[in-house]
Image (cartoon, grey):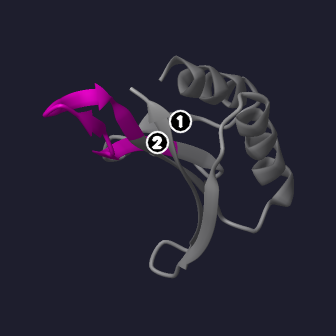
Amino acid sequence: MDKIIKILEELEKQGIPYAYDHFAEGEGPDPPFLCFRCPNSDNFAADGTVYFPITEIDIELYTDKKDPEIEKRLEDQLIQSGIFFEKTETWIDSEKLYEVLYSFEQEA
């Protein structure tokens, strides 16, 4: 998890704030911003116990317009940290925001 926090802190220095899961009601920043969470585990079991703990991690990038430059900055940080990720994109009409989701697993 330390790698992820370092990546997010670096992006925050560049003006992209982040929070775990969500920002508090009324405290959400203007886009772009990031949220991250650990929604599941995908542990490897052996002999009836957790042999290798694995955490699923999602980083969500929210923008009010498509911004390939910010996506590239985040992706470069993930790649430099040796993180293999999957990426999806969704337009959230009710919020008028793009959500670019980066999903990956990491040793807990």
Q: Which residue is the extreme one toward the left?
A: 48
x, y (%) of residue 34?
A: 56, 44
Q: Name the residue that disc number 2 marks.
A: 36
Give the residue type at disc 2: Phe
Q: Nearer the viewer, residue 6 or 25?
A: 6
- Look at the image and tell me whether residue 29 can be seen: no
Decide which of tag 1 and tag 2 comes sooner along the chain: 1
| Magenta residue check for 18 | no
Under tag 2, what secondary structure? strand
x, y (%) of residue 49?
A: 16, 29
Chain part drawn in magenta: 35-55
Q: Name which residue lies at 45% across and 79% down.
A: 94
Q: Nearer the viewer, residue 95 or 79?
A: 79
| Mark 1: few/some/many CA within 10 Å (<14, 14-19, 20+) | many
Q: Which mark is residue 18?
A: 1
The correct choice, above or below, for 100 with respect to 89 in the image is: above
Q: Nearer the viewer, mark 1 or mark 2?
A: 2
The correct choice, above or below, for 30 with respect to 48 in the image is: below
Under tag 1, what secondary structure? strand
Which quarter of the figure has residue 65?
Answer: bottom right
Total residue callouts: 2
Q: Which residue is the extreme one toward the right?
A: 69
Give the residue type at disc 1: Tyr
